[in-house]
Image (spheres, coloured by chain):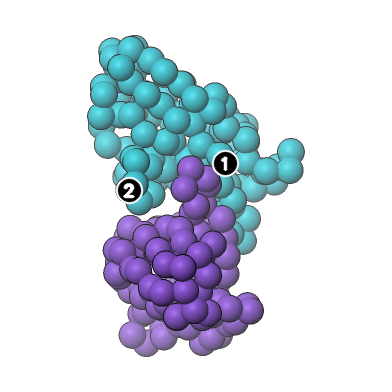
Chain colours: A purple, B cyan
Amino acid sequence: GENVEQHPSTLSVQEGDSAVIKCTYSDSASNYFPWYKQELGKRPQLIIDIRSNVGEKKDQRIAVTLNKTAKHFSLHITETQPEDSAVYFCAASHNNDMRFGAGTRLTVKP
Amino acid sequence: GAGVSQSPSNKVTEKGKDVELRCDPISGHTALYWYRQSLGQGLEFLIYFQGNSAPDKSGLPSDRFSAERTGGSVSTLTIQRTQQEDSAVYLCASSADNIQYFGAGTRLSVL
């Protein structure tokens, strides 16, 4: 089955700096890669996703890149703000069978 | 409904009792997932239902845990003879076209 690894487990940045979270996956059949943000005490919310037919996707300050050959994908947050502080989960999916990474706790210091 | 609904939102039980947690997925979503999340931890996969296929139960931690999905819609996660280590938030998600939508979770406390 699919195995998703996520790094780092914790990340602390200064407000305004960029943050990068990386994930690797094992199943070459995976073709959908979402990122979820979970604020304290709340449910995970989808923030951005990418499908295997594209290499990069951007939405304002958030971007995701995908390297299918190397089986890794990354989340990039630019101009970080304190409200970006949360736990971020990556996932890899094929035919609705999704597996999550262990999560990254991002802290943005004002 | 507009989203994934879980009930109860909070459940306090005594060690050794059985509990049932309910998930109402988004109408039309064929895939349904249960996860467990301990305080400050990641999403632990428990079980996955996809249409009429046999569920993927590979994440269930012990035979005290079971889940059903009746009529391809509502799902119930049952934990028998609860233990203190079962205390966690149990999250349900339903999916269409791979995108998962999460419920607010059930916070289970086993005393």
> Which residue is pictured at 33% across the width and 58% down the height?
A102
Quarter containing the N terminus of chain B: top right
Indicate whether B31 appears above or below A107.
above
Total number of numbered labels? Answer: 2
Image coordinates of residue A24 in percent, x first then y, are 33, 74
Image coordinates of residue A57 in percent, x first then y, are 58, 82
Indicate whether A76 appears above or below A93.
below
Q: Give me the chain letter of mark 2.
A: B
Image coordinates of residue B38 in percent, x first then y, are 34, 40
B56 with respect to B63 (left or right): right
Which image quadrant is residue B25 in? top right
Q: Give me the chain letter of mark 1.
A: B
| Label 2 sits on residue | B41
Image coordinates of residue B75 in percent, x first then y, are 54, 32
Extreme residue in the right direction: B1
SS label for mark 2 = loop
> Which residue is pictured at 30% across the width and 29% down the height?
B86
Give whichever of B44, A11 is nearer the camera. A11
> Which residue is pictured at 33% across the width and 12% down the height?
B14
Disc 1 crowd, CA 10 A, few/some/many (<14, 14-19, 20+): many
Res. B85 visible in picture: yes
| Label 1 sits on residue | B103
Extreme residue in the front direction: A110
- Check disc 2 and give the amino acid type: Gln
